[in-house]
Image (tube, rainbow, N blue to C red):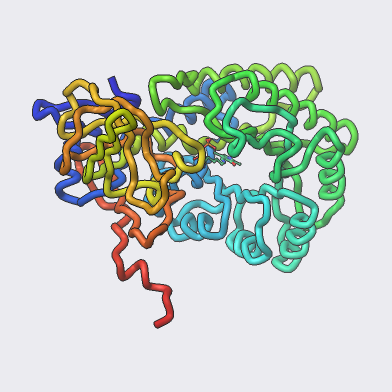
Amino acid sequence: MFVSENLSVNKENHLVIGKNDTVELAKKYGTPLYVMDEDLIRKNCRVYKEAIDKYYGGNGLVLYANKAFCSVYTCRLAAEEGLGADVVSGGELYTAIKAGFPMDKVYFHGNNKTADELEMAVANRVGHIVVDNIYELELLDAIAEKHGIVQKIMFRIKPGVDAHTHSFIRTGQIDSKFGVALENGEAFEIYEKAHRMPNVDPDGLHCHIGSQIFDVEPFCEAAQIMMDFAGDLKDKLGLEIKKLNLGGGYGIMYTEKDDPVPYDEYIKHVSEVVKSTAAKRGIDIPSILMEPGRSIVASAGITLYTVGGIKDIKGVRKYVSVDGGMGDNPRYIMYQSEYAAVIANKAGAPASDKVTVAGKCCESGDLLLKDAMLQEAEAGDILAVLATGAYNYSMASNYNRIPRPAVVAVKDGVPKVIVKRETYEDIIMNDMM
Ligand code: LLP
């Protein structure tokens, strides 16, 4: 009935997440409120881990992509589940450090890491730095020398694969700001250079072709291209690739129109390509890394809002306004993303009303859902937008000086605030008086 498996309706006709009545959560913690189901996050982590065991005999590591939702709590949870971490900024790295995350399992990404960020990564002995370009390579070599270490690295490669997803989140093609391309020789040149450098050890390859992808084919194509490139590096430079990081990007179900392939399926098909190409090229199967973000946390999250004004503009559109919007979920305004929603206090009632849910920001594009079917809404109702666990909290802003919501995690029916609600004092905190 719902897009996420952890949602149900209780006898009061209220939406339930895990074992928690969402109307009670809204009452207790206020709205807007992000709610994350810890049990489902852990379950999602295990799907990937088990697939690595099943298809690669355990020779690999799942890295949780923090950009989807980064907090001290999620870093600790990922560490407890035995995952590594993909971080993409000094801020995400700092969060991981503060959470006590094992630094040797951290992979530091980013297309323009600053000297300060690289320094922070090296000083904290981050396991791998995923280097984006020549400038960064030279910078890093000097920093590693200063620290007297040989830094393990891999380069982000554009495999030239065109994944079918929104152009803003497509990254595997040559026309992308991320990484170095294969087809113009850039990727080979950078490995050749790094191979000769004394303070870096290029022992891996990385690619990430995009996000919210449903087809298996582009992942297989990318894996094949990367393994062939590993073969070329061995043949031409004698350089052995020990780790192959195939990125994230596995699609999730936001609405009934989405039809994701089970993640185990992707990994199975990709593993066949990795193994057959290794055999063909006479190279060892590298340790396999994957970096799911969205598919670990998206379906585990919902956002609760309180309905305010309703405008039924006859013959035009019916707007239902809520107490949040693009500040806590900018995905509609950025990508026209679609979500499913339910009136949490009438969850069992039929969704018979076609409405557009608007946020409270001073921006016409500030919508959460457009022309969606919903239960009849009234002021004071609690609206739950589903599958908001990824790229909502992590992309939230204070536009219009609206404080960001709290995040509550539920586990075994017990709610716990993991990020507190911002206050107006927080909003002016950095203003010089
Ligand atoms: N690894 C790398 C290097 C990435 O760039 C990304 C996502 C991931 C892993 C995780 O991808 P996932 O499994 O979450 O699809 N803000 C956009 C998504 C941007 C994704 C950026 N990179 C959105 O809200 O749809």
Say which quadrant the N terminus sits in: top left
Q: Nearer the viewer, residue 254 or 407?
A: 254
At horizontal 31% and vertical 61% (from top left) the residue drawn is 422
Counting from the top left corner in percent of width and height, residue 56 is at: 59, 24
At horizontal 61% and vertical 59% (from top left) the residue drawn is 121
Res 289 visible = no
Counting from the top left corner in percent of width and height, residue 205 is at: 71, 38
Q: Number of labelled discs?
A: 0
At horizontal 39% and vertical 20% (from top left) the residue drawn is 256
- Left or right: residue 125 versus residue 32 is right
Q: Nearer the viewer, residue 366 or 8?
A: 366
Say which quadrant the C terminus sits in: bottom left
State the residue lying farthest toward the bottom. 433
Q: Nearer the viewer, residue 323 or 10?
A: 323
Q: From what the image shows, is residue 118 above or below residue 349?
A: below
- Left or right: residue 384 versus residue 120 is left
Counting from the top left corner in percent of width and height, residue 293 is at: 49, 38
At horizontal 84% and vertical 39% (from top left) the residue drawn is 188
Q: Nearer the viewer, residue 351 or 293?
A: 351
Q: Quadrant of residue 176?
A: top right
Counting from the top left corner in percent of width and height, residue 3 is at: 34, 25
State the residue lying farthest toward the front. 315
